[in-house]
Image: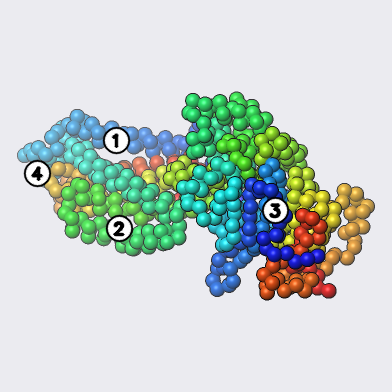
Amino acid sequence: MTALDPAAIVEELPRPLLQVRDLSVRFPARGEGKALKAVDRVSFDIGPGQTLGLVGQSGSGKSTTGRAILQLQKAHSGSVRLLGEELTTMSATRLRQMRRHMQFVLQNPYSSLHPRMTIGQILREPLLVHRSVPPARLQERVAELLDLVSLDPGMMQRYPHEFSGGQRQRVVIARALAVNPDFIVCDEPVSALDVRTQAQIVTLLQSLQERLGLSYLFIAHDLAIVREVAHRVAVMFRGRIVEMGSAAQVYDSPAHPYTRVLLDAVPVPDPVRQRERLRRAPPDLHFLEGDGGGCVHGTDHASSNTAEWHEVAAGHGVSCRYWPSR
Amino acid sequence: MQEEVQKQAFGSRAVKAPRITQGGLLLGIGLAMLAAMLIVTIFAPFIAPFDPSATSPDSLAGASARHWLGTDSIGRDVLSRLIVGGRTTLLITITAVLIALVGGLVLGLLSGYLGGLVDDVIMRVLDVVFAFPVLLLAIAVVAALGPTVPNLILTIAIVYTPAMARVVRAPVLSVKQWDHVEAARSIGMSEFRLVLHHILPLVVSPILVATSLTLSQTIFTVTALSFLGLGPPPPDPNWGGMLSEARQFMELAPLTVIGPAAAIVFATLTFIVLANGLRDVLDVGSV
């Protein structure tokens, strides 16, 4: 394993759609404490038509990362480039236009739709905002969108409360698709739904990706679903990415101890083996406390100005922080 | 949790058929009272049996078939003065509250939505106005500007704007954090459209209730100012002024006091009943 310089953290894709470099978000502390580093120097690329799965436990900074990329949360430092354009320093007006290319699917379909607007009004809104369709074609486009997410276009006059969770999430997806975006942040898009509906929504997202060439940042805590949809997976812990690689690399040969803890936490669908696993002594998680410690390989990253990142295989990197001390 | 709040606030909307609930009944009564008051006020010159300024020799007469509520100290018909006087009082009250509502909406939305320094500055300035007792502040402003109808309207509007702004600001603070607002922002909507379409419609209910309650308080303030001699100048009648003039002859002609007092109570009650009805029907918590 070798230390890398920051520019080479991620294997450079030919022409990434989204390029995130050293993105940090800090929340000011109440009173006199230190500011909370919600996202700490996160870097990754997402190529056209690709999905990056972002996993980690609650509070690890997954959602904040997604919101910071969409500029819904102010970044403390770092750079976010979409289609080659820097978003963090963009003017508000230009950013509003740029939002045509990046959209957001939120976790909770019950609260992310305006309770007093009909489905038709909700879907018309992005079209009006970006003037992407001539007024005469609005109705037609809304019907098209509903059809795209397998909803009956006759439902246009209904209100969100008349729909089930899965149907509402389809509406949320249709709204995101309205302006033909290139990139969608899906923040826990299925975790509020029941299992059968989850599968339907995941399948829908996958088929839309194939048909429209979309790129996703897929944020979830459900490891099984992420494996299903993601080409590459990044594991987040305490605001940092501790491991990143292709889905197969991360799931089949996890390199970071935290990734192993996460994977081990998934219950085994075999009562006998699961019971036996539960009987075993709980793993020592002491190493996950504190600030992550120094480099496990003894590299002085600060003085050599390299990232705290080591490559274990092509395209498979791991952080040298939060390892059990030897 | 947000879902629950949303459900509480908007759950009743799902009920399609209007039901006669206690709140519905209350709202109906309030609206009927308001309609009666407005009809009498608008058509006052046609309804009033006498010219409200015309004097007659039989002063301080009791109730009779000719003068239902008797006459005042210089022989003017109390009922006619009551009907016409309601115009001035209600005009000042309603216009002032509408202005306070607009001012409160603008300041409350700005303050609640933008937050930070803007919020601090607006709220602290309003706190200063809020710190004065309503009547005292009103007396000071009217005394400085002079007791004309436009000045009275302006004064009352200034006095009640801080309260309206607070009522608007509080729900905006919570609604602006709801997911659908974030979703709207991520679409690329302008801030103006965002506030107008995605925040304002969801804070209307508490504002309606508060407006109605403010109207009932304003009636009191307007008549109190007139009673203290800071109302529109005579001879045009208004309820507070009538009360003040009749006060000295209370023992001789009780109806001259009871008439305007009853009118003030009726108007105040109308807006309180309306506010309670609205609160129950719109499912707003205590305001």
Frontmost residue, B113 versus B278: B113
Residue that badge 4 annotates = B74
Give the image location of residue B200, x and y in percent. 45, 44
> Between marks 2 and 4, how big is the CA–CA gap?
34 Å
Q: Residues within 10 Å of mark 4 (few under 14, many from 20)?
A: some
> Between marks 3 and 1, how big is the CA–CA gap?
74 Å
Label 4 sits on a secondary structure element that is loop
The three-letter amino acid code for the residue at tag 1 is: Leu
Which one is closest to the eye, mark 3 or mark 1? 3
Circle on res. B101: none
Kindly indicate whether the residue at mark 1 contacts the one at mark 3 (C-beta within 8 angstroms).
no
- Is tag 1's residue or tag 4's residue first in the polypeptide sequence? 1
Residue that badge 3 annotates = A12
Residue that badge 1 annotates = B38
Have a look at marks 2 and 4 and say if they share a chain: yes
Q: Residue at x 48, y 28 (%)?
A: A135
- Give the colour scheme shown: rainbow
> Between marks 1 and 2, how big is the CA–CA gap?
26 Å
The three-letter amino acid code for the residue at tag 4 is: Ile
